Amino acid sequence: MEHLLTAAFLGSLLLGAVTAGVPLLLAGLGEQISEKAGVLNIGLEGMMLFGAYFGFAVAYQSGSFALGFLAGGAAGAVAALVMVLLCVRLGMNQIVVGIAITLAGEGLTALLHYFTFARSYPRLDKIGTLAVPGLSGLPVVGDALFNRSLLVYLAVLLPFALIWVFRRTQFGLNLQAAGDKPAALDAAGVSVMGTRAAAVLLTGFLGGLGGAYLSTVGGGLFLPFMTGGAGFISIVLAMLARGKPLWVLFGAFLFGASLSLTTAMQVAGIDVPTDVIQMLPFAMVILVLVVFGRHSYLPPALGLPYHRGER
Amino acid sequence: MAGLQEKGRGAEAAFTLLRVLLPVLLALVVGGLILVALGKDPLAYYRFVVERGLLSPIGLQASITRMAPLLLIAAGLIVAFRAGLWNLGVDGQFLLAAVFVAALAPSLVAGGLPHILVILVCFAVAAAIGAAWSVIPAYLKAEHGINEIISTLMMSFLGVSLANVLIKLPFNDPSTTVPQTATLAVEDRLARLGGTTIHWGVLLGLAAVIGVHYLMSRTSLGLKLQIVGSNPRTAIHAGIDVRRLTFLAFAISAAFAGLGGAVDVMGVQGTIRADWNPAYGILVIPLIFLARFNGWAVIGFVFFFAVLMIGGESAARRMGVPTFYVLVQVALLLVFFAVVEMLDHARQKRRGA
C-alpha cells in the first residue's frame, strides 16, 4: 500500500483530477443554471461533444487555445439554441429534444471527425501555463494546482461568481423564480421565456467550453464519443448540488480524481484493467445517489414548459 | 350526414398518416442535405441503402433478423414509457444479459443439456440479469423520487464497462487471441425459419411487442401502469401501489432488454468480443415515440429502421459514409417528431376552441 502514497502517485492523481474535473465543473455549473430556471438539459452530453469538436478544430487551425475555447463555447451555445427554440419557445418535451441533441452531437461530431481528422489524428501541443509565484514550487500540489492554464483558474473562480449572481443579482433571482414559480415571475413583468432562454444558452456555452477543454487540453486531440458520459455525470453533479455552486466544485474534482485514477495507478506501477477503473465514476454516482439520494433537490417547475395563462 | 362523418374520418386518418410520415420525410431530406455538405450524393446513398437493406434477398433477410433484438427492446420500452418511466438504461441491461448468455450457452451445451433447455435457461438468466440491473433505479425512483433518466443512464454506463470486464477476465475464451467469450456452435443457435437466414427470435420479438400492446391496453395491470404513468397522484388516490408497480414496470422493461441480448447472441452473434456495444437501445427509443407507444406502429418503424441500419452498414463499407450517420438521422427524426407533434397539438386546440 505504501507506494500508493508516494509523491509521484499523489501528484499525478491531483494533476489528473484537475484536468478531468474542469470539464465536469464547467458543464455541471452550466446545468445548474438551467435547472434553477426550470429546464432539464439532457442534451448536455451532445453540447459538450459539439464544443469538443469545434474547440479542437479551431484551436488546431488557428493555433490559439483561446480561440478554440471561444469556438467550443459558441458551438455548445448554438446547440443550446435548438433547445431554446424547441423547448423554451415552443414548449416541446425537454427530454425528447435533449436526447435528440445528444444523439446529434454524437453522430455529427463523429461524422465530421471522420471526414476531417480521422486519417491523421493531429495533436495539439501542451497549453501554456501560468505559475502562481511562491506556490507553484510546492511538492505534490505545486504543479497540479498552481501551475495551470488561465482557464483552470477561471473555472475554479466561477462557482464563487455564480454564488454572487444567484444571491445578489436580479438575474439570479429571476432564474430561481423561473424554476420555482414561473407564473409569479411572469406576473412581476419579467419574461419567463427570456430568462429560461438565457439560462439554456449559458448552459450550452459552459458545456461547450468544458468539451473544448476536454479535447484541447485534456486529450490534445478529438475522438468520437470522447466525453464518455461526462455530460451525464455533470447533470448528476448539478442535481446533487441542490443549487449550490460550491458543491459542484467539490463534486467535479472528486469525480475528476476517480476518472484520473487509471493514469495515476500506472504511474505508481499498479496494473488494474482500465475497464474496472472506468466503472468507478459511474459506480460512485450510483452509490452517492443511493446514500444521499433523499437530499437531491430539483425545482418544482423543472421539465415543464411554461405557457402563459395555463395552470 | 353520414357522408360528412365519413369524410371527417377519412381526413383524420390522412392526418394520422401525415403525422407519422412527415417526420420521416423531413429527416430524410435534412439528412440528405447533411450528406451533400459532406460531399456525398444523398440520392445514391439512399438508393444504395434501399437496395442493400430491402431489395436484395440477403439484405432483406438480414434486416428482418436485425428486428429481433430491436423488437424485444421495444416491447420493454413500451411498458416503461406507458408507465411514465424513462428507462434509458436499456443498453446496459441488453449488453450485460448478452454477455452472461454468451458465456453460459456454450458451457451448457458442453455439459450435455438438451437444446430446448439450453434456450430456456439462457432466456431466463437473460431476463433475470436485465431485471436485476433495473432494481437500483427503480428503488431510487420509488423511494426517493430520483429522476430515473439519470440513474438508468449511469447504470447503463456501469453495465457496459462491467460487461467488458467480464469478457476480458472471467468469461474470456483462452483459445482466442482477442478477448472474447467462447463461441456457440452454429447448430446450437436459434433455429432458422424455412430456407432463410432468419431465426425464430424474430417471431418472439413480434409476439412480445403485440403481447405488450394488449397487456397495456386490455388488462387491469396495464391500465394501472398507465394511470401511474399519466398521473401518479391519481394513482395513489385510486389505491394503486405505485411503489410496487414502479419496480414491476422497470423489471418487465429491463427483462425484455435482457431477452433482446439473449436472442442476438444465440441467434446471430454466437460470441461477444470485448468492446462490442451495438447501442440498439438509444436508437430504439425515438422509434417508440414516433409510433406513439402503439405496438403495431412500433413493428413498422422497427422494420424501417432495421433496413436503414443494414443498408447503412453496407454503405459504410462501400460509399464511405460511416454508420455514425444513422445517429444523425435518428436525432433528426426525433426533432421533427417533436415539431409535428406540437403542430398537431396546436391544430387540435384550434378545433377544440
Image: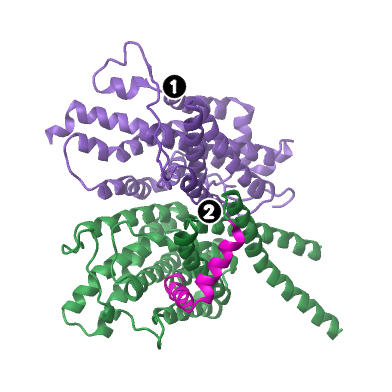
Chain colours: A purple, B green
Q: Position of residue A48 (x, y in %)?
A: 49, 41
What is the crowding at mark 2: few (fewer than 14 residues within 10 Å), some, or many (at least 20)? many
Foreground residue among A117 and A93: A117
- Magenta span has A114? no
Name the element at disc 2. helix
Q: Chain of mark 1?
A: A
Foreground residue among B155 and B162: B162
Looking at numbered disc 2 in the image, what kind of residue is underneath it? Ile
What secondary structure prevails in the magenta region?
helix
Looking at numbered disc 1 in the image, what kind of residue is underneath it? Leu
Residue stretch rendered in magenta on the structure? B41-70
Q: Residue at x 40, y 25 (%)?
A: A127
Q: Position of residue B183 (x, y in %)?
A: 24, 70
Q: In terms of sequence position, does the residue under pointer 2 or pointer 1 come before the other?
A: 2
Asked if B50 appears above or below B168 in the picture, the reply is below
Asked if B230 appears above or below B33 in the picture, the reply is below
Q: Please tell me the numbered disc located at residue A150.
A: 1
Foreground residue among A283 and A171: A283
Q: Which residue is mark 2?
A: A99
Q: Residue furthest top?
A: A134
What is the crowding at mark 1: few (fewer than 14 residues within 10 Å), some, or many (at least 20)? some
